[in-house]
Amino acid sequence: LKKFDFISGGDNVNWRWDAMDPIPVIDRDEFQRLALQRLRELNVVLLLSTTVAGAIVTDGTVGGVFIETGEGRRAVTAKVVIDTTGEADVAASADAETDDRHAREEAGMGLFFRVEGVEWDRYETFRAAERDKPLAADEQRWVDEVLYGALERVWQNYPREVLPFMKADWESGAFKYVASVPGGAHVYKIPFATHDQDVTTIEARWAGGKMSVLNALDRSTIEAAARAHAYDTVDFYRRHVPGCEQIRISQIAPYMGNRYSRTIVPDYTMTKDDIVSERKFDDVVHVLTTLYKYGG
């Protein structure tokens, strides 16, 4: 395979979440190209635009999966089935032991989108001048009571530079930076440059087990709200933020992802100490990279 630097993007104005280092970003397009190239070299047969509908289980052994395509339901048999759904869908359908509590907890869901038309030099100049200004007493009170209240949590890395516009639009009813979703979730845009200069996310969170990412209606309701909020938030930037007068969405993710969901109950669960001590395992299949610096 061609060797290249996977790390790209990031922020050119010393972005930080507290004491965390700038976030490295995988070059998504190049990674996809190389992954497809490698699969072709290995003669892997791909079934894209296909949905897995469940596991084929005989006498307690998984022997393949049922799939749904435009031709209808089909069966694909295999000696080995690896569940890479991220939500243990195949494992659960095979009655494997799973843990569902993360799907009901306050889960971070995200809908990525890319913008174009931004004069980034003007935007970054504006952002650099505004982001570190101390809050006035009324602004701090509004953040604590209104913004954090709407989120039902403290969000320290909100985009400080747009706070005056955020507060004014919220109070006038023109736009709420944090939108409420039927069922108890909240959606909001994280700051630009968190993942890449022109790529950001509408994030969704909820508290108290109000919703579940495994519930089809909950998930659809949240995603629909996130998609609408992406366009509304871009319009907010267009109306208020220097350099964003011509901003528009150029690309939006085909589906919404989530950090936590149903998991397979393993023989062993990694701990924080395992990560900090860089413990090695004989059956390693993935190298975890962490950006957080643990203390103590």
Image: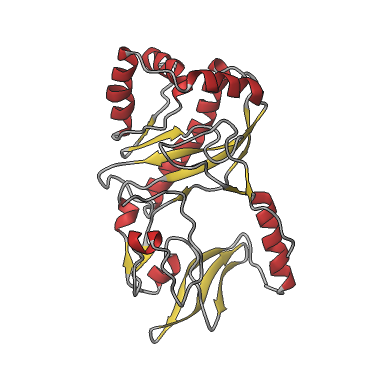
Residue 197 quadrant: top right
Whole-percent x, y for residue 72 in the image: 58, 66
Residue farthest front in this picture: 296
Compared with 175, 249 (above or below) is below
- The percent position of residue 242, horizontal first and vertical second, equals 59, 17
For the residue pair 32 and 17, the one nearer the viewer reads as 17
- The residue most toward the left is 208
In the figure, is residue 202 to the left or right of 251?
left
Q: Is residue 173 left or right of residue 120?
A: left
Viewer-proximal residue among 126 and 106 = 126
Q: Position of residue 144 (x, y in %)?
A: 29, 24
Q: For the point 70% across and 55% down, which residue is it?
A: 4
**Does residue 22 appear left or right of residue 270 in this picture?**
right
Quadrant of the rendering where the N terminus is positioned: bottom right
Residue 53 on image: x %, y %: 48, 66
Q: Which one is nearer the viewer's eye here, 59 or 253? A: 253
At horizontal 43% and vertical 73% (from top left) the residue drawn is 281
- Give the colour scheme shown: secondary structure
Q: How many marks?
A: 0
* Residue toward you, 100 or 74: 100
> For the point 32% across and 46% down, which residue is it?
106
Relative to 68, residue 178 above or below:
above
- What residue sits 62% from the left and 41% below the top? 9
The residue sitting at the bottom extreme is 59
